[in-house]
Image: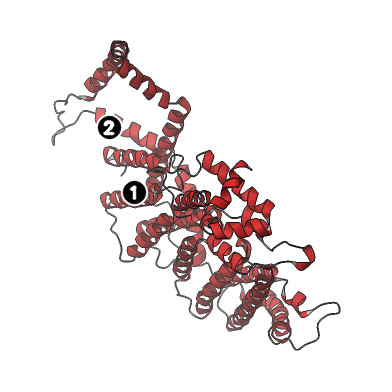
Amino acid sequence: MLREKYNLFGIASAVYAVFLTFCLYQNTKGVTFPFFVAGTLCYFCYCMKKCGVALKKDDLFYFLSLMLLGISVFLTMDSRILFLTRTGIFLLFTAFLLQHFYHTNHWTFTKYLESILEAVIYAIGSFCYPVKDLIYYVQEKKKPKTDADGNPLPKEESKLKYFLLGAAISVPLLIIVLLALSQADAVFGNLLEDFFDLIQIDTVIKVVLLTLFGYFASYSVLHSLVKRELKEDCTGNRTKEPIIAITFTSVISVVYLIFCVIQILYLFMGNMQLPEGYTYAQYAKQGFYELLFVCVMNLIILLVCISLFKESNILKGILSVITVCTYIMIASSAYRMYLYVDAYHLTFLRLFVFFSLFVIAVLMVGIFITIFRDGFPLFRYCMVAITIFTIILSYSHPDYLIAKYNLKHMTPIVEEGNTYRDVSYLCNHLCADAAPVLLQPETFKHLLEVEPNQARWYYDDCYSDYEDGKMNVSLRTFNLSTFRYKKAFETLQQDTAILSLKQH
């Protein structure tokens, strides 16, 4: 279908590729990113319309979610959040396209995951089709057209060859004219020289390569979707003997029950005798990462069991026990982390543990429903939940929150003299999102008092970024976090007590 209308889809892909290059060339964190997301939606919606694929009622969720994620990109400089956001955008786009080209209502969770992976593989395998379809389209155009009786029609003379001939003639003429005019007028000559100085060969090559990639990638994805190579049938997945699952889940469920009883008696109630050499604080402030790992493992075990094994009331009961135990483990890990943060303050990893535990708790609700209701749309439930939480996380600016919390709860360590907790982390491990907090004049003066070396190193890094132009933003590369970083540093520099640091 695409090859017959290559003039339509080929031009649309070419325009999209140029737009992609403008938005993303050396600018994956700028204000143009949400425009890239919107442009990608427009491109695929336009192509779907031309292919006769209609939009659906729940597309509003995809549109709003993708745009919110796209907008969040230019609001932060946190590479970890940007990675999660871009991954979410990719997966959401893939799910959006799959539900329009395939009947996905009856797909299971595992079928969705398999289809996303297969869709990526098929798209990569279609990378040669932009060239193949172009050759086919040109060859078809060259064939003589016939009327209803099969008689050849008069061949329409193509104007393209005349255009190409005129363009070829214009190149040497343009060179001669530019050389003559540059010698005739000094101002024009300087303007021409400056223009060619701006054009760098390596930049031109990179722009061309990115444009070609955008063209081939967009057309290949569209081609693989239109061919509908994925198998829609997902029946027969739950064919495994449930005794297998009952055996291994019953073993771990017994261990989980014992562990959860210990959590209730020792951790939550705190009225049992601890192992020798352990204080209650030491007991509580450990194991949260291990418990997070076990919770994730339980999530996978439950998904495998409800996806592969035949229905069994015994298995449902055991999976319900594992679900309840998982919630106790989530509470245990969260409580341990709370105690640890109360003593040692926040880091991104510690904050991310809370976030992950909360997401797992919500996902477990969908899994618990699926245990007793086979037709529950688990994948869509998980997709909506993860999308909402990713949007919340992307707009929360964790490093900013960490800086505010740690500064508010900063306490001296008596045994180490006049040093404070987390100053090194604040000054060396937070991104530009935290700068509006750390570079406030009063806050920075306090950091200078308690940890002068760390504060000076942080200032030197900021000053280096300022002098090297890393804080500069243009209309195309504007990033709100970088802009606030620069403004906060300029405000700090105006403070008379800080001026001496410029000579440091």
Tell me which corner region of the image, top left, top right, bottom left or bottom right, holds residue 101: bottom left
Residue 176 visible in this rendered orientation of the protein = yes
Is residue 388 or residue 488 the one in the foreground?
A: 488
Q: Is residue 305 above or below residue 212?
A: below
Q: Amino acid at mark 1?
A: Gly
Q: Which mark is residue 140?
A: 2
Residue 308 visible in this rendered orientation of the protein = no
Colour theme: secondary structure
Q: Quadrant of the N terminus?
A: top left
Q: Residue at x 63, y 54 (%)?
A: 427
| Secondary structure type for disc 2 | helix
Q: Which mark is residue 39?
A: 1
Q: Quadrant of the C terminus?
A: top right
Is residue 477 or residue 374 the one in the foreground?
A: 477
Q: Residues within 10 Å of mark 2 (few under 14, many from 20)?
A: few
Q: Is residue 422 above or below residue 194?
A: below
As drawn, is 252 to the left or to the right of 120? Answer: right
Q: Is residue 166 above or below residue 264?
A: above
Residue 432 image position (x, y, % from top left):
53, 52
As drawn, is 108 to the left or to the right of 419? Answer: left
Q: How many marks?
A: 2
| Secondary structure type for disc 1 | helix
Q: Residues within 10 Å of mark 1 (few under 14, many from 20)?
A: some
Q: Nearer the viewer, mark 1 or mark 2?
A: 1
Residue 480 image position (x, y, % from top left):
43, 52
